[in-house]
């Protein structure tokens, strides 16, 4: 499915409900944390989770991420690709291969 | 930019570093919460934030969201659009217009 | 060690630095989430964690919790004991014993 | 109220329900993040919050913090006081006074 279509639907939902007044970058950042906590709740006591719940909560995290990107005039694929370039530098393959160590301890 | 290209680049980065062994759904859900906290740190003391920091941290949240969706065989635009349909039902325009009230209190 | 002594030291640190202007309940709630994310980072890739890091990050979460309680005129032991009473009711021993199920699904 | 009494009541609740099997440090760290998100939800759209909700959610965060400290053999007041000593060093009064700047940018 097209991301542009997703953004049109999100903007329409917000516009119809006059919710943009609540969607400051700060409130959206809080919302991303709140929904991330709900997603994590699916894994609170272990690795087994209800896939429908995970899908639903992940969708909420993504929706607020998309709204924050939109509010700041950012394209989600562009900023992820830009950050990937930096991750490549911070985690050289020869040092990071097979290790979960943080870059500043590699 | 194309989301498929983003996914190819993410998968390549993970594969080259043999990181998929760490990317259980549970660990990815934790990672989304951790990165959401870093994003929120840009707004810890108020609404003014460094746009470059926000972009960088939002990219991290998105990357882990994309990885979790990928691990579960989910398409991010599809699950967001599916969830939007449910939000439409839980927040009817006539009740939710101009209000930030949660659906169970509308 | 005495909790009252802890509170005296926290209040002194804040007062000397004139930080109370930043410590609105909202900012403290954000700070608790941010520090919780840093604590969780110790467990990002599994159950093994550096005890010194965990202790340090847990202390940060607690400090902001203590500050929020103080800002609202709440005693931390009193509110935890009050909530325990409610948990007793929501999770009757005969239903909850040996199960991590959430109360609304017991 | 005495913190020792709080700990006795928490340990009794956990013991009666045979919940200690779920309370690994990792699961408790996740729980702290999850409950912090619920606390933050009280402030999702601004600084006005229901004090009863805040009290209840803050109590949940604290309960899991107390459980994690207990699981690791740590005293909450001791670790907070220890960390305060480090904060004093990282944020000298003359540099930090009236500023919310992070220590590495002071």
Image (cartoon, coloured by chain):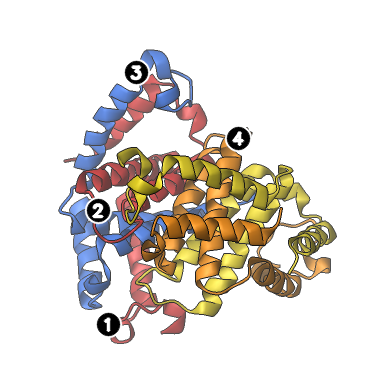
Chain colours: A red, B blue, C yellow, D orange
Mark 4 vs mark 1: tell me if same chain: no
Chain of the residue that carries numbered disc 2 in the rendered image = A
Q: Which residue is nearer to you in this view: C101 or C95? A: C95
Q: Whole-Å distance between the Cαs marked 2 and 4?
A: 31 Å
Q: Image quadrant of residue B10? A: bottom left
Q: Is residue A1 left or right of residue B43?
A: left
Of helix, strand and loop, which one carries label 4? helix
The quadrant the N terminus of chain A occupies is top left
- Give me the residue at 15% from left, 53% from top: B73
Q: CA distance from mark 4 to mark 1?
A: 49 Å
Disc 4 crowd, CA 10 A, few/some/many (<14, 14-19, 20+) = few
Label 3 marks a residue whose chain is B
Question: What residue appears at the point 65 percent right and 62 percent down from the top-left corner?
Answer: D4
What element does badge 3 sit on?
loop
Q: Which residue position is annotated with label 2?
A: A49
Q: For mark 1, does the 10 Å Cα neighbourhood hold few (<14), some (14 to 19), or many (20 or more) residues? A: some
Residue C76 bears which disc, if any? none
Which numbered disc covers residue D52? 4
C58 in relation to D45, above or below: below
Badges 2 and 4, same chain: no
The residue to which callout 3 is attached is B92
Q: Depth check: A35 or A82 in front?
A: A35
- Mark number for residue A97? 1
């Amino acid at each position: 499915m097209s991301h542009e279509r997703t953004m049109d639907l999100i903007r329409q939902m917000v516009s119809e409900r006059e919710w943009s007044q609540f969607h400051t970058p700060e409130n959206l950042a809080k919302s991303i944390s709140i929904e991330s906590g709900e997603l994590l709740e699916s894994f609170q006591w272990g690795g087994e989770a209800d896939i429908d719940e995970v899908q639903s909560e992940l969708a909420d995290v993504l929706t607020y991420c998309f709204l924050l990107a939109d509010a700041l005039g950012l394209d989600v694929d562009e900023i992820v690709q830009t950050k990937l370039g930096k991750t490549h530098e911070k985690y050289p393959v020869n040092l990071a291969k097979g290790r979960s160590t943080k870059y500043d301890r590699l």
